Amino acid sequence: MGAEYRNDLLGHIYAFAPRAAPERFHTGFDGDADWPPNAEGLRELRGLGALVGYSHPFHQPIGDCDSPKSIVWPAPRNCTARELVADAALGLVDSLDVLTHSSITASAAVYRRLIGAGNRLAVTAGTDSMISFSSISFSSISSSLISFSSISFTRAGNQSNPPGWARVYAQVEGALTAASFAEAVRAGRTFATTGPWLELSVDGCGPGDTIDTCRGDRLTVTATAIGPEVTAVRVRTAEGVRAGAERLPAGERWGGEVRGLEPATSPGDWFEAGGRPPTVHWRGEEEVLSVTVELETDRPTYVIAEALCDPHPRTLNHTGYALTSPVYVDVDGRPVATPADVRWCLDWLDLLEGLIKQHARLADRDQLIDHLAVLRQARAVYQSRLR
């Protein structure tokens, strides 16, 4: 079974494969208090053996250099995953639905901040499909490539996507069962996609792995994307985009020529920093876009791969995209905890405290104290990562 635990001020949580139903499924509805904190709901669901994460997390646009204020404050009760930053620090969250019907770009930006701050979260996808609703409308989509009827999962102003419009793949060990799938996600062996197939190799290791290195070691990173809608494949670390390749526009190429993308950390061509020219080749009948780069481990980091896409009939969303979970690179025994990302998360917690004090519906001072305790514990975790 699966369940959704909801609070519109603090965020909605998915629970996959709990052994039993939780005692509560929501707080803050129909005049109820916004209490207890989502952290308690997560603890209960984890105690039932569930895989847990935040769903349709972010709706407002946010860029890599933006303050968290634009997400935490604009509209108090819009299902934004405001408690996520605290709950991730406390080790209560297994994954984040980066690919959803909400803003994929905003969710990806926050996800990078969270893993850069030292939180280990798998990337997942969720369409928020409400297939038990009786009032649904039908629409048709057709083109030269695809023609079929689809369901619009929209009711009372709440939007979601049909199952499969965004999805997560997990590398399971042994037979595919609910338990093996959940364990694979917990281990971070995942990528999420609107369609493209995406692969990441860091010295032969894949998403979810941790590589122990010494300062000055070199790692070979290869990112590979497959799909007719793919326009670019990129390698990212905590320092930003380190390598990439993009297809030339259709009118400028024969047979899928590509060009390199400059890394965010170097003014020169990307392969001058240790990369190799990007390639296009065929795997069966599929065209493959691939890029390889050599990275020097001067500080702890993570490595992820992403695929950017043009509009395509099978995407059926505003944004075509694919993203892997990280390969974590420890250096001299230290895991990644980028100071800028840690401080960004601390700023988030300060903003969340103010929002709870101003907007949360609480019955008494004790309920506020419970919320503040969660934030205090999360602050202590982040502050310890700055030492």
Image (spheres, grey):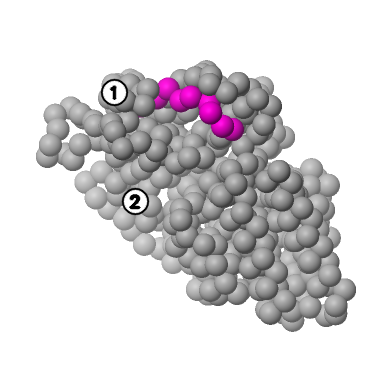
> Which quadrant is the C terminus positioned in?
top right
Q: Amino acid at mark 1?
A: Pro
User: Horizontal placement of 234 versus 254: left or right?
Assistant: right
- What secondary structure is marked by label 1? strand
Which tag, 2 or 1, sits closer to the chain's start? 2
**Residue farthest along the front direction in this orientation:** 387
Q: Amino acid at mark 2?
A: Phe
Q: Position of residue 341 (x, y in %)?
A: 57, 49
The residue identified by callout 1 is 277
- What secondary structure is marked by label 2? strand
Inspect the magenta stretch and tell me whether residue 111 lies in it: no
Q: Which mark is residue 253?
A: none
Q: Nearer the viewer, residue 55 or 312?
A: 55
Q: Nearer the viewer, residue 189 or 128?
A: 189
User: Horizontal placement of 243 versus 342: left or right?
Assistant: left
Q: Does residue 273 sit above or below 58 in this rendering?
A: above
User: Are there few (<14), some (14-19), or many (20+) residues within 10 Å of tag 2?
Assistant: few
| Residue 191 visible in the displayed image | no
Q: Residue at x 59, y 29 (%)?
A: 329
Magenta segment, which residues? 291-300
Q: How many marks?
A: 2
Instruction: For marks 2 and 1, give the one nearer the viewer.
Output: 1
Q: Position of residue 71 (x, y in %)?
A: 54, 65
Q: Position of residue 223 (x, y in %)?
A: 42, 28
Q: Quadrant of residue 348?
A: bottom right
Q: Position of residue 4 (x, y in %)?
A: 68, 58
Q: CA distance from mark 2 to mark 1?
A: 40 Å
Q: Residue at x 29, y 46 (%)?
A: 310
The residue identified by callout 2 is 148
| Residue 356 visible in the displayed image | yes
